[in-house]
Amino acid sequence: MSGPETLLGGAGEPAAGASAGTGAGAGAGRAPAPGPAAGGRRLVERVARVRELGIVVALAALFGVTGAVNPSFLGLDSLRDILLNSSIIAMLAVGQTLVVVTRNVDLSVSSVVGLTAFGGAVVLADTGVPIPVVIVGCVLAGALCGAVNGLLVGVAKVPALVATLGTLYAFRGIDFAVAGGRQVNAADMPESFLSLGSASVLGLPLLALVALVVLLAVGWMLGNLPWGRELYAIGSNPDAAVLAGIQVRRRVLAAFVLNGALAGLAGVMWAARFGTVDATVATGKELDVIAAVVVGGVAIFGGSGTVYGAALGALLLSSITSALAVLRVDALAQTAINGALIITAIVLDRVLALRVAAALRRRRYRDAR
């Protein structure tokens, strides 16, 4: 799991330094014992792996039970549809994780998806602009929307819930104003663009591969770059992050901008996947994204969680939707199941956080002795 040292790193350094300097004879020729920071990091990393492994086990159980009842659920076409349906939510969940680990949230992602999906579709339908230029334009438009959120939250210090709730309606209103009741159909867009939504590479859907590349890239950045570590530090303790010299406003702004850029890319994916777009595209999807993030083990109060868990959460929720359809369960049950999963994830997160804190206190007490 990325970021544990930002949570725990300050606790162990003095102890390590003290043991190293206790005398020339005592420590000569012997490597210092790992301090509580290293042990704390390992403990938190183990907890993260357990959370993500739990989602994998739940997925295996879901596929096993549903496949036993209806073997067609495990067919190639069914698995392909699940991957396609989860790829867009997974993309959005990756971006949302960047914001949530800083102790914020972005409710406007669905409106950004709708705005960029419709805007890109209109440009493709009415002009001869090359597809790569349209994709880049949608990503930049999403980044601009993210910058608006980042300035409101990171610079103006407006609570994220209030700021992004306002931009959710503002961006959707712009979408409706631009659309003017128009609907862009698949027949209006280039076939080469629509083929992106159904193309496969080595048997895997192209959209799922794009989401996977983004997942791996962002996961690597969070785990290996100082920028990513600082996001966790901000979410763990914003005041301590400021004292540590972290540019909190810039980092929060950057998180929102990158989240918006990924939402813009998801808008292009939506247009290519479904073909028909209007001003209502992706309405309400922000709740699915947040559900995927929370179910995936990202702490809603910031400071912990991984993009891999968030992506697994998106895959689990999409798989549940498909399984309910195969089992002929009322679609309205999906809402209840999502709510139950969110509550369970929050309770589990709280229980694990208390147990980790207690274990760290015991370890520090032993080290102090």
Image (cartoon, rainbow, N blue to C red):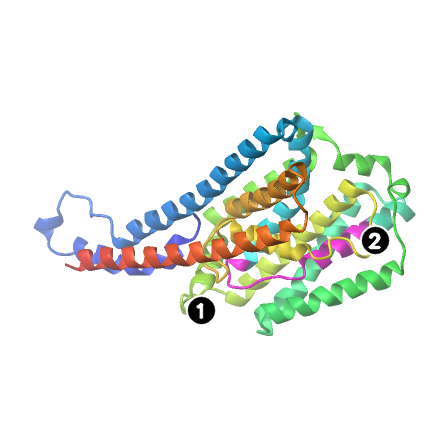
Within the magenta stretch, is there residue 281?
Answer: no
Find residue 104 and report its horizontal and vertical position in percent. 55, 64
Q: Secondary structure at mark 2?
A: loop
Front residue of this view, candidates 230 and 288: 288
Res 260 visible? no
Left or right of residue 42, residue 115 in this image: right
Find residue 361 and report its horizontal and vertical position in percent. 26, 60
Query: From which residue to which does the magenta span run?
Result: 100-120
Kind of residue at badge 2: Asp
Q: Residues within 10 Å of mark 2 (few under 14, many from 20)?
A: many
Q: Quadrant of the C terminus?
A: bottom left
Front residue of this view, candidates 70 and 4: 70
Residue 291 found in image quarter: bottom right
Disc ID at residue 105: none
Question: Label 1: which residue?
Answer: 242
Question: Label 2: which residue?
Answer: 278
